[in-house]
Image (cartoon, rainbow, N blue to C red):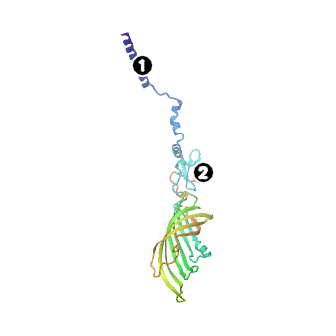
Amino acid sequence: MKRSFAIICAALLLTVAFALSAQTKRRMTPVTTQATTTQSVNETASDTSRINAKRRANSVSYLNEKGQTVYVDTITGEEWMDSTLIKRVPKMEYPLFDAFSVGLNVWDPLMRAFGQQYGLADAWVELSLHNRYKPVFEAGLGLADHTPSGGNYTYRSPLSFYFRVGANYNFLYNSNPDYSFFAGVRYGFSPFSFSVDNITVNSPYWHETTTFNIPAQHATVGWFEFCLGLRVKLWGPLSAGWTVKYQAILHSSKCSYGDPWYIPGYGARSSTINGSFSVVYTFGLGHLNKPKAADVISEGEITPQQASTQEQ
């Protein structure tokens, strides 16, 4: 009996102790220390965006010669730039109308100097958009007067016009515009005429030689080109560019005496790989996209002259 009574009393004491402990915890108030009073300050000490927003409210601004916004502290006169408003990786580093280039392709003249019997020269113009997309128009003149080694005929094509139209894509569009690595496509087209003269046929049976000509034929040919190229700066606005081309004929008119051997602007009909080497002169167009600072001052902004007057 005494033992049972002792166990009951011990249980009651434990119950009361737990109740008092829970009540004490519920009534406990937080302790204020130096760390807790500065907690909100510590959380915003490195918040550059919030700090700069407060600083901008106490500043006036103007655009410098580079089109950048410069803030001037109205109390100290200190000039500063808000780095939180600057895009770290701009999508387009260069303006829409970046440059205009004129090129002269001297590949065919060089090849003719080494014995090539066809081709002449062409020139092209290119508009650089953001230093990334570059529409191109090319035009040139071609001719042929070709007698194959050991051959029995002469292929002739008088001076004829051809053109190409297409575009390049510069993979280094956010890099130095003096250097570019690009891929491009072209559509080429040429209306021209050709003839085959002095065709010699020997007859071993009759021991006779016959010579005849195929009269002038008129043809139109269109073709596709895929290009890979590299351009580097030589001096000032002058640069040089190398291009390798894969080409394929898309359409060709029918001729009575067969297909033409040479196509102006394309080269030998059987060739699928071609190249070009151009000397290029570039005109910068960046000034067309950059408004003057005086023209873009908005309400609440001041010019550099006004800022220096306020500092004095």
Nearest-to-viewer mark from 2 and 1: 1
* 311 in relation to 36, above or below: below
Write the residue at 49% across / 83% down. 216
Q: Residue at x 41, y 21 (%)?
A: 18
Give whichever of 260, 205 is nearer the camera: 205
Q: Is residue 60 visible?
A: yes
The residue indicated by pointer 2 is 308
Q: Quadrant of residue 292?
A: bottom right
Find the distance from the CA under tag 2 to the CA under tag 1: 76 Å
Q: Is residue 4 left or right of residue 34?
A: left
Most foreground residue, 272 or 282: 272
Residue 233 position in % (x across, y down): 61, 63
Residue behind mark 1: 17
Q: Residue furthest front?
A: 205
Q: Between 171 and 272, which is closer to the camera in this rendering? A: 272
Q: Which three-letter amino acid code belongs to the residue tagged 1?
A: Ala
